Image: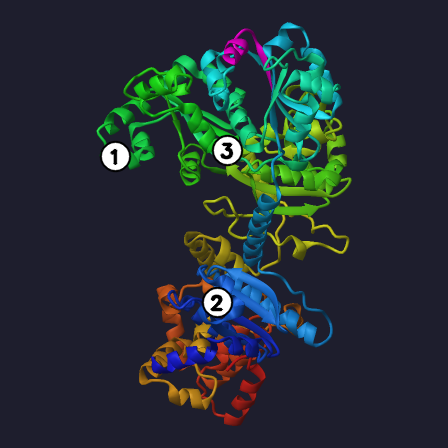
Amino acid sequence: MAGRRKAEIQLQMQIESQEEWEDLLSKEGLNVVDVYQEWCGPCSGMVANLRRLKNELGDDLLRFATAKADMIDSLDKYRGHCEPCFLFYAGGCLVAVVRGANSPKILRTITEQLKQEHKCLDGGSERKEIKDPFIAQLEAKEKETDKEEEEEEEEGVKEVTVALIKPDAVEAGKVDQILEDIKAAGIEVLKHEERKLTEDEVRQFYTHLQDQDFFEDLVKFMTSGPSHVLALTKGKTGENIIDEFRDLIGPTDVEEAKTQKPESLRAKHGQQTFMNALHGSSSADMATRELAFFFPDFVAPHVDGKAPKLQRTLALVRPEAFRLHKDEIISKIRESGFKVAMQKEMQLTREMAEEFYKEHKGQEYFDQLVTNMSSGPVLALGLAREDAIEGWRSMLGPKEVDKAKEEAPESLRAKFAVDDAINSLHGSDSEDTAKKELEFFFPMEQTVAVIKPDAEGTKDEIIDRIHEAGFKIAARKETKLTREIAEEFYADHKDKDYYNDLVEHMTSGPTYLMVLSREAAVDGWRSMIGPTDPTQAKEVSPDSIRATYGESILKNAVHGSSDPEHAKKTIKAIFGDLMFNPDGTALETIDEEAEKDQEGFAAEVPTTKTAEKPVSDSTKDAEESSPEVKQQQLNEQRTKEEETREETPKEETKEEEKTDEQPSTEESKEEQSKEEQQEEKQEEAPKEEKTEEETKAPSPKPSETEAKPSETEAKPSESEAQPQSETEAKPEEQQQEESKTEEKPSEETEQKTEESTAQGEEKKEETQSEEKAPDTQTTEESKEEEKKEETKPEGGD
């Protein structure tokens, strides 16, 4: 065992510092590096396979190493991500990455990249450096986060002021004229409501004037008739709107206004003292207070029209309120500026309700709450607004129904109370809670989004809207679709009249394909893109993508999966077997840049019917077949080959095992323990025995030998798909026949050796087995030595 451990250490260099890492990358050849962290260790399960391949190839340009990410600065991004990861470096460049202990894929990649490196060193090819898709994804996330933080710092909301058209101007019929004068000054009216103020509202609004002698007369005047309340801004930023509007309306005193600002609105429409037609906020702080007073749910527009960063929260309408007040509650939600991004009606089991409210377990109301929540269907809503969490909780009012009725009679819990013990509605209390609760009712889902050739020019704008709606782009690919792929993509439309035109259009230019992740992603994306016909979309969903960017039913900018099953099928067809993290990101994203061809488009998207790369039969067995299928195939193959007097494929595995365990030099033999040498003898024993039928088999014709130059080159890892114990796997009759071989004369051994020479080009490992047969019975020792040299396979011991 000591010898074996030493062989493993020699097989993989241990890299534990930045200097050693740089030295490794400077060496010529292909370096296969197993990246790990100290607490989890390298992938020991691959060592035997790597050693076997090293012995088979016998290539000095191939080196194996383990690299401790904890100690190497260049591998800092791999810290905290300790699933098996193999990096392939050639000429100091990263040329391939394999994640996971996928033995067939790792061995196949080694063979392919080593062959490519030989071409590069011979001047027949150039290295193609890649980026680790996983690391590229992490860096993209970091950049996106930094960008969002920068935008949040740079972006601001427009400055807004509040204006009142007072009862005297309303009674005199001056409202329309005043509004025309306001708009003529370039001022934008964001909100406009007519309302008759109550005495309490007037006293609260003018609380800063309550010590004035005219205060009671002001209260009486302001409650004498309806007023018009306005929220105003101006230009791209709203800067100076407060001062500009106060300048437009003129001095508070009407007589002073007529003297100093005869063109002002108070000079034109005011009467005397506080009956001066209009009011305007006196400062930014006052404007904020007055906006909250008159328009509590108002959200100021962002500078330059940039959409605000939306926040999401969960709203739950409990069974009785859902049954009695569903439509009224949804109407109130929409009136308050919330977008209903997701909506689901469902019946909770008692177990589900207990799980959702598990943080309340132990409270005296817990059983009653769970019983209430599982008593009938509930309505779950995903609400979006800039201040969704606080805004929704403010609308709900106090949790205790009695308190809500007393302190906030206009709140939803007060208005739609059904049970005084349990309030009718629920809202998330923080961003973290909102995320968990939304995932509970709306699990993460994927859909396919396509930006069609006609919308190529607006791609960036559409992607911005995708991010704003809370979608994550888990994978993306830009390509020019072939007709075959377009036909498969729109197979559901094959019987439609427009099918051929659709296929022609989709192959006319670059198409941008994406996998989007979000809660209720399929319905959310379809809702966001709107109806198929852009004309209809403009009528029923004017803010939808198709309404904004679509030209016709054919050129309607975007496409989306119709249901979750269709989405899964399409993702597999375009992106292969993608796996997703709980947050919706892909476990391994597609490196779009690495796949682009010379024209700048990605390589054609493979369909499910197209194999990505030709692989050997043994590799396919290892990757695709179940153990039962592989065993059945092997049994059938043994039977067929027995009939034709050919050796079974399992003898290849036997010889590979021999190659693995046999040292390549006399020095390594001496280092082996007695236990290993004894194991060698046990392995060699069955190999020395040849069947009577094999020794009598005629030598194949030269033409047949030339017809199969080297099938074993296409089967580098066939032994991995075979059982380890060859003697146990063979039928008992065959083992008995093999035992007779010891009695055969040397002439038959020579004949078998000649046959092996011809078959050696077809199966190198088989030849290696016959080469190792003992020559104690040979009468012409020099002749046998010469024959051994002729039959010795390349890359053997």
Residue for badge 1: 361
56 and 124: which is toward the camera: 124
Up-down relation of residue 71 to residue 316 (above or below): below
Q: Secondary structure at mark 2?
A: strand
Residue for badge 2: 35
Residue positioned 45% across, 33% down in the render: 389
Camera-side mark, 3 or 1: 3
665 and 183: which is toward the camera: 183
> Mark 2 near mark 3, Cβ–Cβ under 8 Å?
no
Drawn side of residue 39 relative to residue 386, left or right: left
Q: For mark 3, does the 10 Å Cα neighbourhood hold few (<14), some (14 to 19), or many (20 or more) residues?
A: some
Residue for badge 3: 387
Quadrant containing the N terminus is bottom left
The amino acid type, in three-letter code, at marker 1 is: Lys
Q: Which residues are magenta?
A: 217-230
Which mark sits nearer the N-terminus, 2 or 3? 2
